[in-house]
Amino acid sequence: MNNPSFASVQDMLASLRPSYPVMCFWPERIAQTARRFLDGFPGKVLYAVKCNPHGIVLDAMYGAGIRNFDTASLNEIALVDERFEDANCYFNHPVKSRAAIDSAVRVYGVNDFVVDHPSELGKLIEIAGPGHIIQVRLRTPGGVATFDLSAKFGADEDMGVELLREVVAQKSRPAVSFHVGSQCSKPSAYAKAFEIVARVLSRAGVAPEYINVGGGFPVSDAETKAPPLEEFFAQIRESAAQYGFLDKVPLYCEPGRGMVADAASLITQVHLRKDNQLYLNEGIFGSLSEIVYGDMRPPLQAIRLKGPLSNEMRPFTLFGPTCDSNDVVPHQFALPKDISEGDWIEVGGVGAYSNALQSSFNGFTTDTFVAIRGTMPSAFAP
Ligand SMILES: *Cc1c(COP(=O)(O)O)cnc(C)c1O
């Protein structure tokens, strides 16, 4: 499938004059961040497909050298496997159907799995047989990230020890994984996780194939600046060294958000203005749900093709297109005071968990995806 590409957002607007929402990706920005991970992370880099499975994103990753993908469903495995002949999929969901395990092994040759409970381990061995790499997902302390990923998954230390021993007893190959939570602002969260990993591995007395530090790498928004990726890489390297893993046990990471969040803008159009209320063609049931769930403050800019917009700003309430009263952004955003019907709003930093989460509620869905060539305007690349 070919997606159109344009020299700039302005160029796209002039050409399409879209009354529908348009998702714009900067593939060069994605590739740049992927290379930053590949060069800076002290180990193997997997891309977490769930974050944004769009073809433009996957192709940019692949072009930059990413060959390993964290997948959580048969659909994601098929998507990657059928797109890239030499890609490797890891089935990193702690709860899998028997059918999905069977197909992953037989059809797609998947060899890496995750478990966090003895029943899942039993199921996996029963369907997939012995000899696979089985990561034991450990729970890490919450409260360090916008989205806690240990509230639902992750074995406590005692169960982690038990599972690792059982993987070995079942003639399979143990590994360890964790996820400190998505949009994790503190490098020290990885240090705490390594402390748990070291304790569990030493109690279990098993040698892991690798330690998978998950995702969690944060991005800046319009109000909060995230520490640079390199600070996280340095902390991970330091913790791995502290417990004697560095250069002995391979490290893996599987970022989603940190790879793509800042590499996309959503272009939405104002369809009606009532005083300080703007009715847009995209909202929280569409690609902007993280503004609610993550309380994110993406950078916004108004765009008018014919004539200038006022430099004077005032706060506006943003309504989405559906007829549900809940379809409103829960805080106001500053926009030019004369913004009106037909103007566009560029919502920046929406590459992660945006189109991947959208519904088609009320018939509204973003289905136009374009690539913008070259480097990003700096206001939207914090
Ligand atoms: C969602 C997820 C990721 C990606 O997390 P980010 O915070 O987006 O980097 C990685 N690994 C697993 C197991 C996940 O569930």
Image: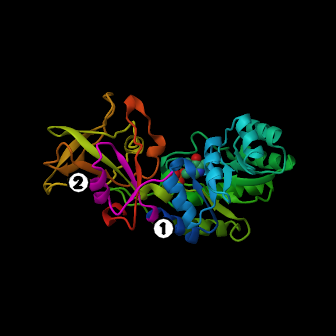
Mark linked to residue 32: 1
Q: Amino acid at mark 1?
A: Gln
Mark linked to residue 49: none
Q: Quadrant of the C terminus?
A: bottom left
Figure quadrant of residue 271:
top left
* Mark 2 or 1: the one toward you: 2
Where does the image place residue 242, in percent across and percent down from the top left? 65, 68
Magenta stretch contains residue 109: no
Specify whether 274 is left or right of 84.
left
Q: Residue at x 72, y 44 (%)?
A: 104
Q: Write down the residue under mark 2.
A: 303
Q: Residue at x 63, y 56 (%)?
A: 84
> Which is more toward the observer, 55 or 218?
55
Q: Residue at x 62, y 69 (%)?
A: 42
Where does the image place residue 347, in percent across and percent down from the top left? 32, 51
> Which is more toward the observer, 14 or 303?
14
Q: Are marks 2 and 1 in contact (CB under 8 Å)?
A: no
Q: Is the residue indicated by label 2 positioned so its CB lies within 8 Å of ligand 1?
A: no
Q: Amino acid at mark 2?
A: Ile
Where does the image place residue 44, in percent across and percent down from the top left? 64, 64
Q: Which residues are magenta?
A: 1-28
> Which is more toward the observer, 71 or 170?
71
Of label 2 and label 1, which has the lower sequence position?
A: 1
Specify whether 272 is left or right of 377.
left
Can residue 180 be seen here? The reply is no
Q: CA distance from mark 2 to mark 1?
A: 27 Å
Q: Residue at x 66, y 51 (%)?
A: 81
Magenta stretch contains residue 18: yes
> Which is more toward the observer, 168 or 201?
168
Secondary element under disc 1, as helix, strand or loop, is helix
Specify whether 319 is left or right of 256.
left
Q: Where 231 sits versus 108, above or below?
A: below
